[in-house]
Amino acid sequence: MYEATTRGRTATGLVSSRAGSRVVLLATSVLPEFRGKEVAARLIGGVLDELRMQGKSATATCPSTAAFVNAHPKYADVPDPAFPQSRSRAWALNTRPKGPRRRPPAHCRPCRSPRR
């Protein structure tokens, strides 16, 4: 797990797993008070820089990490060419319904009455 701290507090974390010379970047989490301050972007960039220096490749299964890599061409050499991102992520991108989101049916909405 990679972590970034701000003023002595953990602000964000990136969960990873190693598979030989490849690192799978699984999930990114940012504490609410640090959201919108680019701490996750700095952490992801630092992790990718470190992996590059170590000669390792990465597979991004985390949507935030995959979006970061896609938005920053300077990291194009870090993703593993055989496994650049998880199949489930690629599947999710290709199967997401197009157009505006539909509201769920009335019976799926949360009940506003107190529990019995």
Image: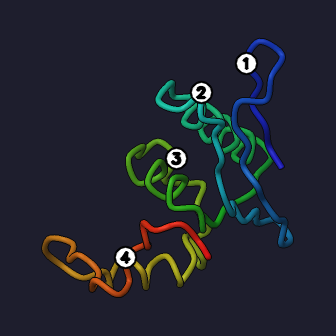
Mark nearest the camera among 3 and 4 is 4
Mark 3 and mark 2: Cα distance apart in space:
24 Å
Task: Pinpoint residue 71: horizontal percent, then vertical percent.
Answer: 38, 47
Looking at the rendered structure, the kind of residue marked 2 is: Phe
Q: Are marks 2 and 4 in contact (CB under 8 Å)?
A: no
Q: Based on the displayed image, in which of its 4 quarters is residue 47 positioned?
A: top right
Check disc 1 and report the residue beneath it.
6
Nearer the observer, 74 or 101: 101
Q: Amino acid at mark 1?
A: Thr
Nearest to N terminus: mark 1 or mark 4: 1
In the rendering, which numbered label is found on residue 75? Answer: 3
Gap in angstroms between the C-alphas marked 3 and 1: 25 Å
Residue at the image position 79 percent from the left and 29 percent from the top: 10
Which residue is outermost to the left? Answer: 99
Q: x, y (%) of residue 56?
A: 75, 56
Q: Would you say the residues marked 2 and 1 are in contact, meaning their CB atoms lie under 8 Å apart?
A: yes
Q: Secondary structure at mark 3?
A: helix
Question: Is disc 3 in contact with disc 2, using a CB cutoff of under 8 Å?
Answer: no
Label whose residue precedes the other's in the sequence (3 or 4) = 3
Classify residue 45 by image quadrant: top right
Q: Amino acid at mark 4?
A: Arg
Q: x and y percent of residue 65 in the render? A: 55, 53
The disc placed on residue 34 is 2
